[in-house]
C-alpha cells in the first residue's frame, strides 16, 4: 500500500523481536532500509540508484533483492525475512 507519494513502505517482523522497514521511492530511485531488534535501531542504510526490485518467497521466507547502479558503483542488496532477518550487501566498482 502507498505510504509516501509515489513510493511504498514495506514492513516485516520476526517472532524473535526483529523488525525490518524498507522505504522504496521509485521516482527518486532510492531506498532506505532500517533494521531494529526489540525496538532498538541496529542498521540504517540509505542508497540511491536503485534500478530493480524483486520479491520472492523461498522456503517460507520473504526474499527481497534490490539492484543498484550509480556512477561507477553497482551492486545488489539482499534482505531475507523468515525466522530471522538476514541482510547481505554487495557493491562493486566498475
Image (cartoon, rainbow, N blue to C red):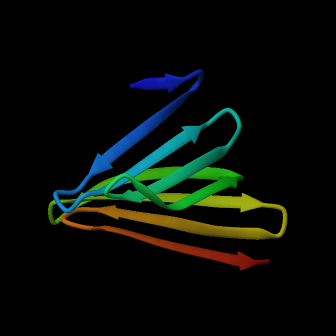
Q: Is residue 11 above or below residue 13?
A: above
Residue 61 drawn at (x, y percent): 22, 61
Identify which residue is drawn at 71% across, 37% down: 28
Q: Is residue 27 above or below residue 53?
A: above
Taking depth in this image into account, of 69 and 14 the one nearest to the observer is 14
Q: Is residue 35 above or below residue 2?
A: below
Question: Quick check: 62 left or right of 65?
Answer: left
Question: Quick check: 75 left or right of 80?
Answer: right
Residue 1 drawn at (x, y percent): 38, 25
Identify which residue is drawn at 56% across, 67% down: 76
Identify which residue is drawn at 83% across, 69% down: 72
In which quadrant of the rendered image does the C terminus lie? bottom right
Residue 70 drawn at (x, y percent): 78, 59
Question: Quick check: 35 left or right of 23?
Answer: left
Q: Residue furthest right?
A: 71
Identify which residue is drawn at 61% across, 37% down: 25
Q: How many numbered marks, from 0 up?
A: 0
Amino acid at each position: 500500500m502507498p505510504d509516501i507519494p509515489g513510493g511504498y513502505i514495506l514492513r516485516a517482523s520476526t517472532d524473535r523481536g526483529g523488525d525490518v522497514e524498507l522505504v522504496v521511492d521509485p521516482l527518486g530511485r532510492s531506498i532506505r532500509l532500517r533494521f531494529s531488534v526489540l525496538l532498538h535501531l541496529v542498521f540504517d542504510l540509505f542508497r540511491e540508484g536503485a534500478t530493480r526490485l524483486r520479491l520472492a518467497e523461498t522456503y517460507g521466507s520473504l526474499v527481497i533483492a534490490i539492484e543498484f547502479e550509480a556512477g561507477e558503483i553497482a551492486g545488489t542488496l539482499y534482505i531475507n525475512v523468515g525466522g530471522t532477518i538476514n541482510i547481505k550487501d554487495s557493491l562493486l566498482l566498475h
